[in-house]
């Protein structure tokens, strides 16, 4: 690993901690400090991940077969998480909408492409 990229990996670690803070309860008892921490500072983590991953993708995209292997890995991970959350997604769909069983394949395809199998994946 090159030394210049190590700081980006450390920044990813910090950003992942910020994501955990976003999803946790109240960290600071003072409302203004809590707002500044969670709604201003911690919310920078997701855009940072997008930019950081784009940087690494661009850095390696000229290697032969990298783009296809990257896309394959992303689709495999997304599909595995989709399948893992299908029971919860179906439960949410049946509680929210009155859908009959023959629409299930269509609903799963739309869910895979549009929203994920459970709403929190987006």
Image (cartoon, rainbow, N blue to C red):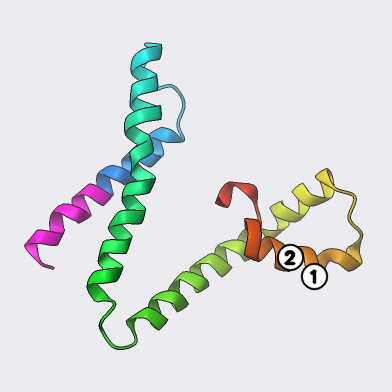
Q: Looking at the image, which is closer to me, 12 or 55?
A: 55
Is there any visible trace of residue 47 in the rendered image?
A: yes
**Disc 1 secondary structure class:** helix
Residue 3 occupies which quadrant of the picture? bottom left
Is there any visible trace of residue 29 in the rendered image?
A: no
Q: Identify the residue at horizontal 57%, vertical 69% (top origin).
A: 79
Determine the residue located farthest toward the bottom in the rendered image.
64
**Mark 2 vs 1: CB contact within 8 A:** yes
Q: Is residue 9 magenta?
A: yes
Q: Identify the residue at horizontal 34%, vertical 22% (top origin).
A: 36
Q: Identify the residue at horizontal 56%, vertical 67% (top origin).
A: 80
Is 30 displayed left or right of 4 in the figure? right
Q: Is residue 122 magenta?
A: no
How many circles with numbers are drawn on the protein? 2
Majority secondary structure of magenta residues: helix
Residue 55 occupies which quadrant of the picture? bottom left
Sort mark 1 into few (<14), some (14-19) or many (20+) by Cα contacts within 10 Å. Answer: few
Residue 83, image x, y percentages: 63, 65
**Residue 68 vertical position relative to residue 17 in the rendered view, above or below:** below
Is 77 displayed left or right of 35 in the figure? right
Q: Identify the residue at horizontal 26%, vertical 48% (top origin).
A: 13
Which residue is tagged 2? Answer: 108
Magenta residues?
1-12
- What distance separates the C-alpha of mark 2 from that of mark 1? 5 Å
**Residue 11 vertical position relative to residue 87 in the rendered view, above or below:** above
Residue 26, image x, y percentages: 43, 21
Which residue is tagged 1? Answer: 105
């Amino acid at each position: 690993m090159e030394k210049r990229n190590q700081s980006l990996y450390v920044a990813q670690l910090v950003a992942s901690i910020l994501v955990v803070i976003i999803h946790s309860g109240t960290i600071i008892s003072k409302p203004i400090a809590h707002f500044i921490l969670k709604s201003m500072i911690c919310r920078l983590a997701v855009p940072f991940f997008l930019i950081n991953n784009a940087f690494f993708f661009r850095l390696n995209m000229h290697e032969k077969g990298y783009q296809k292997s990257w896309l394959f890995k992303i689709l495999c991970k997304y599909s595995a998480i989709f399948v893992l959350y299908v029971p919860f997604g179906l439960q949410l769909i049946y509680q929210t909408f009155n859908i009959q069983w023959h629409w299930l394949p269509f609903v799963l395809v739309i869910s895979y492409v549009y929203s994920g199998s459970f709403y929190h994946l987006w």
